[in-house]
Amino acid sequence: MAATDTCTTTSTADSTPRDTFGGTGMARGLDVLQTTAVRQRALRRLLLEKIVPPITAVFLVLVAWQLLSMAHAQRADLLPGPLDVWDSLHEQWLEGTILGVIWTSVSRGALGFLASVIIASPLGLLIGRVTSVRAAIGPILTGLQAIPSVAWVPAAILWFGLSNAAVYAVVLLGAVPSIAGGLVAGIDRVQPVHLHAGRTMGATGIHGIRHILLPAALPGYVAGLRQGWAFAWRSLMAAELIAGSPSLGLGLGRALENAREAQDMPAVLATIVLILLVGISIELIVFAPLERHVLRSRGLLARDN
């Protein structure tokens, strides 16, 4: 036992300096240094390419805005400075109304967009795969995308009255053609060899659509979803601007119109800023990560982007 203990102690004593100063320890140290350097480069690149440019752009816009206001390019009541708009936002925050107004519009927009996806996806699939349907509906779909959403508001009010149904109808008419069009464009870019390979392996009918066609058309579909959300949001703002009723609640569009009627220019610009921030937030939180994921999964985007 004594000999064994001695050997164990000797072995342990010998291994300690080797782990600390030998090849393994040095390799680990180099790995740590390399990992730290890579992280620092990634952080520096993130700051320089993703964070600094938009902050600089916003700062320059605010400076230009303030200079125009100070130069009296317009009457002071028509062109308030950024600080006046900030004061208006702060006042709305203190009144406790700002989050409710944003939620009313965002919840409407999200529900209308989801309904648009449910309607547009099978429609786009049908147009993309059936030649006769494409010949019949394709031009109509393209024409619908050219109609401004605000043009549908009077018709929707006459059809459904001043109700949420009118608002959702405008959102659907704005978003469905864009989403369906994006899916059709994605289907058109699918390589025929992929479909042929799928059929060879027995992926036909619903299985072929689910496992071959839709995954291959996903980049175009995601682009259509992003465009569809943009149309849905614009359509919602147009509908809320025109279709004013206490039963509809107070969304961003109606708040904008109320501020215009009160000739409260800081409130008008503050509401425009909120509409812009919501649009940017949805883009950054939902669609930009979704698009990056789809493109990376297909090798169309570098992992570090």
Image: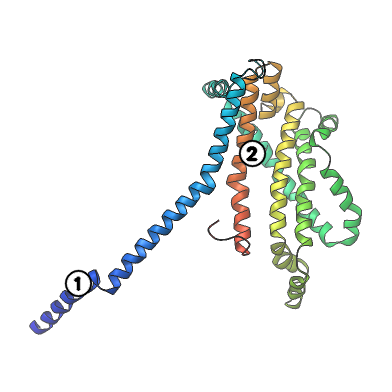
Q: Residue 167 or 303: which is nearer the viewer?
A: 303
Q: Position of residue 262 (x, y in %)?
A: 68, 15
Please give the residue where the numbered disc 1 appears in the rendered image: 17
Residue 142 x/y as whole percent: 85, 48
The residue sitting at 73% across, 23% down in the picture is 245
Relative to residue 270, is residue 123 drawn left or right? right
The answer to whether any part of residue 97 appears in the image is no
Rendering coords of residue 264 (x, y %):
65, 17
- Location of residue 3 with respect to 162 vertically, above or below: below
Q: Quadrant of the N terminus?
A: bottom left
Q: Amino acid at mark 2?
A: Gly
What residue is drawn where x is 76% and y is 62%? 189
Between discs 1 and 2, the one toward the N terminus: 1
In the picture, the disc for residue 274 is none
- Total marks placed: 2
Q: Is residue 138 left or right of residue 293?
A: right
Tag 1: Cα neighbours inside 10 Å, few (<14), some, or many (≥20)? few
In this rendering, does residue 247 appear at all?
A: yes
Q: Nearer the viewer, residue 142 or 60?
A: 60
Tag 2 residue: 279
Pointer 1 with pointer 2, Cβ within 8 A: no
- Which residue is most to the left? 2
Q: Is residue 185 or residue 105 the one in the foreground?
A: 185
How dense is the environment of label 2, judged by Cα within 10 Å: few (below 14), some, or many (20 and up)?
A: some
- Describe the element under mark 1 as helix, strand or loop: helix
Q: Secondary structure at mark 2?
A: helix
Q: Position of residue 103 (x, y in %)?
A: 61, 33
Task: Determine the image quadrant of residue 130.
Answer: bottom right
Q: Nearer the viewer, mark 1 or mark 2?
A: 1
